[in-house]
Amino acid sequence: MSKLENILPASVREFDRSASNLYKSIRRGIGAAVLSPSAIEERANSQARAKLIQSSSESMARVIEALSEAETSTVQTTTGDASLAIRTIGRITQEALEQQLNRESVAELTRAQLESLEPQSDADSEIETDWLNIFWDLAEKRSDKDIQSIFARILAGEILEPGKFSARTLLVLATMSPVSAQLFEKVCNCSVKIADDDCFIVNEQNSVFSALSGQTFDKFDISFSDFASLRSLGLLSDSGRYSVTKDTENEEFSWGFSGITRKFSMDRQKTDFGIIMFSSVGCELRSLIAIEPPDGFKEATESYFVRKGFRFMDSPED
């Protein structure tokens, strides 16, 4: 692994298995493990990207035009149209080039993402080849920078913790539009996290958190149709009730409100409230988002849960 020291992010350089996972991921994705940090900006330059595609396509066109008369004659005999073969080869070549550029862009973004992380331990297993095959087959088809960034964060997470993201999450992301991604982030900013796989949005009628009763989350610029759209994508589950019961008089709880972990106790034995649960896919994608609650959400959340019997033991700024 010593030959790779100059290209490996510092976050994985000291961990053999994580470094091996990165190397395997990049080899599987782009066919090489040489990742230049400056290439991130180069891939982000749409003009440079378009120029590369055009020049490569023109070069391939010249190669195609140089096909021997015998080959052209054979194609014409089979299809009745030699130009059909030329167009087919040209299309396939351009598609392959665009897909390779998308793959390399995601690879570079993954490296940059790993540079920003500080894992405390090595990966506990090898990243799965089948998972990587699915990942790259889907990532190569997305050219939007924001979606590529999400793919990169997923791959970085999977390199450090294999099994963290499911193949279904990849499939959902592959069909997600940039608008849907922005909407999902907006909803995540108004969510509560109990555990990595247990996240929800409060949905209580006759309150500021009424998501489906017609009042909606208007104060936070989220509409009924927004929730319906995210549910159709498989990011949210059906609405229901959530119950919290304390087993001992002084039991303490710790939940994530507005991206901040808050400790609280309860002044009653049991309380419940309406919610919309995140699906397992939604929880996985939520873990990639830096929660930034909208103005007034922290205060509205604390006020609501105090009425539900919560006694917060710290301030929102702790």
Image (cartoon, rainbow, N blue to C red):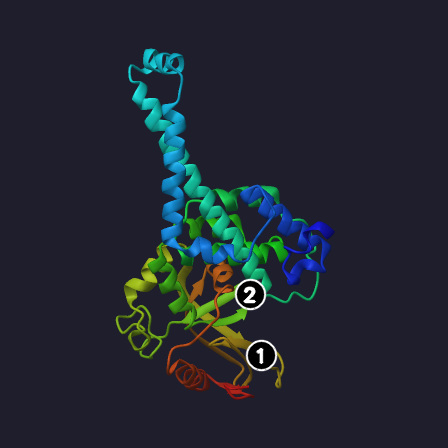
Q: Verify CB contact (< 8 Å) between mark 2 and mark 1.
A: no
Q: Amino acid at mark 1?
A: Phe
Give the residue pinned by disc 2.
Answer: 196
Would residue 213 be found to the left or right of residue 126 on screen? left
- Which sits in the foreground, 312 or 6? 6
Label 2 element class: loop
As drawn, the label of residue 72 is none
Q: Select label 2 or label 1 by which is in front.
A: 2
From this view, report whether residue 139 is shown above or below residue 183.
Answer: above
Q: In the picture, residue 113 is in which quadrant?
A: bottom right
- Which sits in the foreground, 131 or 190? 131
Would residue 48 be found to the left or right of residue 316 on screen? left
Report the residue that reaches farthest toward the left: 214
Residue beneath the point at 63% across and 46% down: 24
Circle 1: is it few (<14), some (14-19), or many (20+) Cα within 10 Å?
Answer: some
> Horizontal and vertical percent for residue 307?
43, 86
> Horizontal and vertical percent for residue 17?
70, 53
- Which sits in the foreground, 295 or 224? 295
Q: In the picture, residue 18 is in which quadrant?
A: bottom right
As drawn, the label of residue 253 is 1
- Which sits in the foreground, 161 or 48? 48
Residue beneath the point at 51% across and 46% down: 135
From this view, report whether residue 255 is shown above or below residue 281.
Answer: below
Would residue 217 be found to the left or right of residue 307 on screen? left
The answer to whether any part of residue 114 appears in the image is yes
Distance from Cα at disc 2 to Cα at disc 1 = 15 Å
Name the quadrant of the C terminus: bottom right
> Horizontal and vertical percent for residue 282?
46, 60
Q: Amino acid at mark 2?
A: Asp
